Amino acid sequence: MTDAQEDDIDLRSLSDDELIEQMHDDLYDGLQEEIVEGTQILLERGWGPSKVLDEALVAGMNIVGVDFRDGILFVPEVLMAANAMKGGMEILRPLLAETGAPPLGKAVIGTVKGDIHDIGKNLVTMMWEGAGFEVIDIGINKPVEEFIEALETHQPDILGMSALLTTTMPYMKVVIDELVERGLRDDYIVLVGGAPLNEEFGEAIGADAYCRDAAVAVETAKEFMQKKRNAAG
Ligand code: B1M
């Protein structure tokens, strides 16, 4: 499609299904303004923020992921798609985080050393905040020292780690081993996630649980907090 044709599309005139399809195209093309507008339109039409996130943004990013894997898209295009997605996520963030309840618990989360993927981690952060957790996001490419420092500073209930690369996921074990070494392992609920992980891996590295997606991360965090409260009497 040419730029001129692109300009012609009035997103508001599209049906919900057409708009979703158009947003997948716009995400693919890294068009942040259009993603922001599409997100706003869906919310105005009464869509819940989680539905917009899943059907418009995450589903669109999955299409990008397949073409990235197949060598059709390259890093610059994928970065633009990621930026476009972040534009939509910024609108959804306060809506997902709307809660008047006292914090359910505190979490520190980061993407491990060598890995700069942050969209999944940011989503987990948003969903945890939305569920009522206080979350300290220490960012991407974090070495073990920074995880330990954040734990000491913030004294959270939960440590969350994210990795999207098969080459960086073993680093989660480096962090957990350091906690064991310092006698701190049992002070924290350690939850891990990221596309290449699975339950077996989570178990093998000594995490408390692997979380398949952000919704599971919320359920798992709540479950472990409940256990912690029960254990504390
Ligand atoms: Co990257 N990349 N990438 N990339 N990238 C993948 C991961 C890849 C699978 C693409 C592919 O080949 N199909 C592949 C990894 C292959 C492998 O390791 N086996 C890959 C590669 C190879 C690379 C580079 C090495 C490419 C290169 O340079 N040659 C490079 C590495 C850079 C580095 O980290 N050192 C690279 C770079 C990039 C970009 C910078 C261009 C960009 C990242 C931008 C950003 O994050 N700001 C990027 C992107 C966007 C992707 C894909 C396309 C999308 C990832 C994403 O954001 N998904 C990805 C392909 C794919 O996964 N489909 C790919 C959407 C997000 C919502 O899902 O992150 O899975 P996800 O998060 C989910 C769950 O996993 C879970 O909940 C989230 C929400 O439901 N979860 C957690 C995640 N973290 C959690 C933590 C928790 C709990 C749950 O804690 C408790």
Image: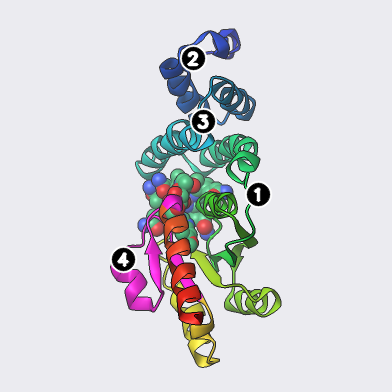
State the image coordinates of residue 64 (x, y, percent, origin top left): 43, 37
State the image coordinates of residue 5 (x, y, percent, origin top left): 55, 9
Quick one: label 1, few (<14), some, or many (20+) residues within 10 Å?
few
Q: Give the range drawn in magenta.
A: 189-215
- Give the residue number, with chain letter if any, for mark 4: 199
State the image coordinates of residue 200 (x, y, percent, origin top left): 28, 69
- Give the residue number, with chain letter if any, for mark 3: 27
Residue 202 versus residue 211 in the image, above or below: below
Name the side, left or right, on which 34 lies relative to 170. right
Name the residue at the left extreme: 200
Residue 54 figure quarter: top left
- Give the residue number, with chain letter if any, for mark 2: 1
Q: CA gap, disc 2 to disc 4? A: 42 Å
Which of the two labelled residues, at mark 1 and mark 3, occupies the earlier sequence position? 3
Q: Do the residues labelled 3 and 2 touch (CB within 8 Å)?
A: no
The secondary structure type at the circle numbered 1 is loop
